Image (cartoon, grey):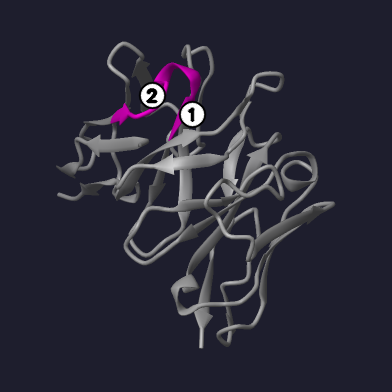
Amino acid sequence: EVQLVESGGGQVKPGGSLRLSCAASGFDFTSYSMNWVRQAPGKGLEWVSSITTGSTYIQYGDAVKGRFTTSRDNAKNAVYLQMNSLRAEDAAVYYCARDRSYNFLRGSPMAWFDSWGQGTLVTVSS
Amino acid sequence: QSVLTQPPSVSAAPGQKVTISCSGSSSNIGNNYVSWYQQLPGTAPKLLIFDNDKRPSGIPDRFSASKSGTSATLGITGLQTGDEADYYCATWDGSLSNVLFGGGTKLTVL
């Protein structure tokens, strides 16, 4: 059974940092690109980042570019989201999601997120 | 304001059919694949449709989708109260270099 389990969420002050982790199991982690998607309270879904199998392509949404860094450790079946310079508008549930495919020809995610974690809540408040 | 436009809400009676539209442009829907997600209250999203019109295993054929030009449509037939959820479309935007989600549509089964 495919499982994605996020951790690392919590409360942080504006300007602070947080590192989220996503532990994957039940599938060949090295064969899938992974993504982070967030959802602010009462709001819609917002794509945060994508990372390909060998970390060749790492992409970010405009709202987090330059502040967030995505990485993965294929030996540990884990993907990470380092969040720096956090703002109030970054407060959200952060989901880890597996992409069913990746368009290497275009260098872009297919956005076919077929497995999701339960999410981890990030609160940004002074 | 989302680049992909969905109606905020739709409603229909049990057993009926409903469609949810997702309107974009040539830089996103027009030249990329569309996916659809169902998010039941308090849960993570679930992939309903990928590659414009394909259902993952386990998704009933009551759910269907199509794409034409710069718009996509999700259809749900034989509505059940358990279908009450938020529905999102998504695709890549080549101009913005971002994955885009529609603003979401809340389905009410009356």
Provide residue B72's location: percent of width, then percent of height: 73, 57
Between discs 2 and 1, the one toward the N terminus? 1
Q: Which residue is mark 2?
A: A70
Provide residue A16's location: percent of width, then percent of height: 20, 34
Judge whether B47 appears above or below A68 on screen. below
Q: Determine whether the residue tagged by mark 2 lies in a helix, strand or loop.
A: strand
Judge whether B49 appears above or below A5 on screen. below
Cβ–Cβ under 8 Å for marks 2 and 1: yes
Q: Residue at x 37, y 35 (%)?
A: A2
Assess whether residue A33 is covered by the magenta stretch: yes
Provide residue B67's location: percent of width, then percent of height: 78, 53
In the orientation shown, which residue stands out farthest toward the right?
B69
Q: Determine whether the residue tagged by mark 1 lies in a helix, strand or loop.
A: strand
Q: Which residue is mark 1?
A: A50
Q: Chain of mark 1?
A: A
Residue A21 located left or right of residue B12: left
Q: Amino acid at mark 1?
A: Ser
Q: Amino acid at mark 2?
A: Thr
Tell me, yes or no, if residue B77 can be seen here: yes
Quadrant including the N terminus of chain B: bottom right
